[in-house]
Amino acid sequence: MKKTLTILIVAALAFFIFIKEKDARKETNPLYHEAKAAIVLEAETGKILYEQNSKEALPIASMSKLMTQYIVLEAIADGRLSWDSQYKPSTAALNQPRYAVMLGMDKRKTYNVRELFAAMTITSANDAAVALAELVSGTEAEFVQEMNKKAEQFGLTNTRFINATGLDEADTNHATARDVAAIANELLEQYPEVLEFTRMTDFTTSDGTRLWTTNLMLPGMPQEMIGMEGLKTGYTEEAGPCFASTGIYEGKRIITVVMGVGVEGSDTSTPRFTLTRDLIDRYVLNE
């Protein structure tokens, strides 16, 4: 196990260093001044096809759940958890902020890991993320230590987590666009089964409620893009609209990240998808 872990850590560091050294296509006048940061990455080679302000640490909102997903899937692979492991809601999981997206657990019921993971991944349920953190580490605080340790193992010196959800507190989770892309790439490389969940447009909870994905670019959704397979949306007041995406285009797996996308009016969803589509159109499909 230690030998395998060492190999994975070395591979992760090698990938991160690799994308650090790649030259990106840059614009003299950035096309995407309405976004605080953006990156387009070819996953297999680590080649950066486009980047804008990709080295500044910024709030990442629910894109934080990419690391939560990674650690939960690692725990399942290690045998510490199973998809059928049961969870009885704690006070911490039940008492998430009223504005937060929730699965809406009943304190009298138990929930299995599969339902919690689906809720966290597909609808960005924050109570489900806290529940999974507790299942892995006992408390969310201890899980956050594991998140930061994993970021350090990946060589992500500009990433810092304070919770498993990405919700704004006195502080908030921060990472660069390059860091988010690196986490996404590690997740996809080590645990491609995450795509079984990120490709889903909806799922039905154990109490019969149908919940829909926050990723409106999936095939079958209002802003569908053929090839899109995930990964994670995000929005908070501090972070603004964010989106880490992946898909297969021209036979290549592509990862994009957009952060702090500007909005007009109350629509915080559409602009991040419009920008993602334009990045893929310009730097992948029309390269």
Image (tube, rainbow, N blue to C red):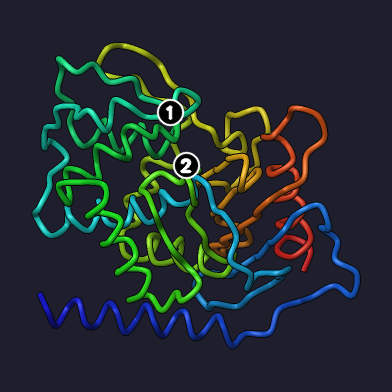
Q: Is residue 41 left or right of residue 200?
A: right
Name above or below for residue 47 compared with residue 188.
below
Name above or below for residue 157 compared with residue 139.
below
Residue at coordinates 74% horizontally, 65% vertically from top-left? 283
Which residue is farthest front? 170
Front one among 254 and 133: 133
Label 2, label 1: how far apart the Cα atoms are: 9 Å
Residue at coordinates 72% horizontally, 48% vertically from top-left? 261
Q: Quadrant of residue 123?
A: top left
Q: Quadrant of residue 110?
A: top left
Callout 2–callout 1 Cβ contact below 8 Å: yes
Name above or below for residue 251 compared with residue 69.
below
Q: Is residue 174 left or right of residue 122?
A: right
Q: Amino acid at mark 2?
A: Leu
Residue where numbered disc 2 is placed: 167
Name above or below for residue 20 compared with residue 174.
below
At label 1, counting other C-alpha atoms closer than 10 Å, the crowd grade (few under 14, some 14-19, many 20 or more) is few
Rendered-image quadrant of the C terminus: bottom right
Q: Quadrant of residue 279?
A: bottom right
Q: Amino acid at mark 1?
A: Pro
At label 2, counting other C-alpha atoms closer than 10 Å, the crowd grade (few under 14, some 14-19, many 20 or more) is many
Front one among 221 and 89: 89
Front one among 6 and 252: 6
Q: Is residue 267 left or right of residue 7?
A: right
SS for dot 2: loop
Residue where numbered disc 1 is placed: 97
Residue 36 horizontal/vertical position (percent): 72, 58
Residue 114 horizontal/vertical position (percent): 23, 35
Which residue is farthest top? 208
